[in-house]
Amino acid sequence: MFPFGPGSPGGDPAAGPRAEDPALYGGRAAAAGPLPFPPVLPQPGADAAPPSPSGSPRCPGGPSLFPAARAGELGRSGALESSAASAQGESPQPSPPRRPPGPDCRAGSRGRHGLSPSLGGPGARLFGWLRERSLGRGLFVDPARDNFRTMTNLYGSIHPADSVYLSTRTHGAVFNLEYSPDGSVLTVACEQTEVLLFDPISSKHIKTLSEAHEDCVNNIRFLDNRLFATCSDDTTIALWDLRKLNTKVCTLHGHTSWVKNIEYDTNTRLLVTSGFDGNVIIWDTNRCTEDGCPHKKFFHTRFLMRMRLTPDCSKMLISTSSGYLLILHDLDLTKSLEVGSYPILRARRTTSSSGVSPRNSLEVLTPEVPGERDRGNCITSLQLHPKGWATLLRCSSNTDDQEWTCVYEFQEGAPVRPVSPRCSLRLTHYIEEANVGRGYIKELCFSPDGRMISSPHGYGIRLLGFDKQCSELIDCLPKEASPLRVIRSLYSHNDVVLTTKFSPTHCQIASGCLSGRVSLYQPKF
């Protein structure tokens, strides 16, 4: 799925010129006029077409970008030298070609593809730029990508002594932590029916929502910067507004057992919840009133633990206490999928006569877990990569004597096995966890850029990376599953840590433990 390594254009910055090079967006060549896009590519072997009177190349039609990329790679060094020489007013000298020179190799010509040689290997650069855009990278697509080395160094410089303890008093265990999208509010879901709100920058307490529910609060999810939802073992979901915290916006009734998970589709504004009753319920927040929201049961399965939506809401993943992972492909939340047992689920792994899987097509997987090949396991925690490239699982053995954190890459395209649908998961990284706090779910998370993982580990947390440099997952995919690298270990609690969360906007990590303490880790300057 990810064929581009660190040495490819646009990979590791240390490996060579990047697609974000200023020359791509104009640089010195900008004075000569804007770069035509998309580029005009003549037929292979044809001489470069002279510019039309309007100043743009003529359009004789051309091939794909792949031959252009190869041609550009052969002449990259010479083109760079030519660019530098032209900038100093000197006559550029052509570099020794690796093949017989033709009209497109003459110094000062527009080159085979009708583009200025001052860009240096135009085909390779344009192809790399297009590929970077398709991967969600680039100067204007993901401006924070080049800052990952600085952020990695900051996270690596955090010490346990730098942690700040929030005054949670005796509100019971901390089951979930959630930042607002702008990072201005940190919410804490407590065992004893309360929700706490803090300013994570000043570490000051904002408000306590006393008796937010009638039982322990399990999960919090922000819908935007002011609205958030909470769910509880009292089988209800509550909507709150930061501008008016004295009362709930509304209370949602529909589950018949503990509600454990909340997701939100920002495109359709549908709230998605799951609980230990095995139901996944859809709530239409577009028609929300004080009495609640219209809702319907979307999906049902036994032993349901956690449910997540991919960032683009094209898939739904459901983990179970029996070790199965269910994936709904081509998700359509407006249609219900009423099934009740695993034999029925397996029977529905079919495709239409046209060979295309229908909407909400279902895949049932048993993810590979190191050390658990001959024993069952329970998938207790489920998270997704911010860009939807992988899923992160916390698994424990049925005998509760082993615990693992595992990363699985989504493999799109042809099935790996004949009985498998379009998409399967491949174990790429793993690490064994401290087997403490048995019976409690430990919630782990990705960093906002997806390069690091924060995982509860005993009385603290560990920051994990795919390699020592905290590279992007697609830049360090191993051929076989390999261990995650421990970047930093932070132990500052006096009890088992149950949950941890990265701030979406600041270099800060929060963790909460069984005794109710919340710690904030951030570097000191």
Image (cartoon, rainbow, N blue to C red):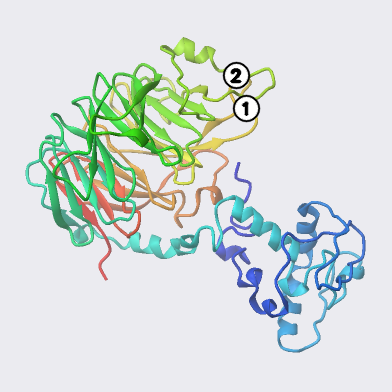
The residue lying toward the viewer, choosing from 223 and 418, is 223
Question: Which picture quadrant has residue 102?
Answer: bottom right
Residue behind mark 1: 415
On screen, 250 above or below 100? above
Residue at coordinates 26% horizontally, 27% vertically from top-left?
A: 259
Q: How crowded is mark 1: few (under 14 residues within 10 Å), some or many (20 or more)?
A: few
Tell me the residue that label 2 is attached to: 419
Task: For marks 1 and 2, give the CA distance.
Answer: 8 Å
Amino acid at pointer 1: Pro
Q: Does residue 323 appear left or right of residue 100 in this picture?
A: left
Q: Answer left or right for 71 relative to 446.
A: right
Give residue 184's mark: none
Please state which of residues 83 and 8 is positioned toward the viewer in this rendering: 83
Kind of residue indicated by mark 2: Val
Q: Name the residue at the bottom extreme.
A: 89
**At which x and y percent is residue 152?**
39, 60
Q: Do the residues labelled 1 and 2 touch (CB within 8 Å)?
A: yes
Determine if residue 168 is in view: yes
Quadrant where the N terminus lies?
A: top right
Apparent side of residue 317 relative to residue 47 in the rendered image (left or right): left
| Residue 153 position in % (x across, y down) | 38, 63
The quarter of the rendered structure image containing the C terminus is: bottom left
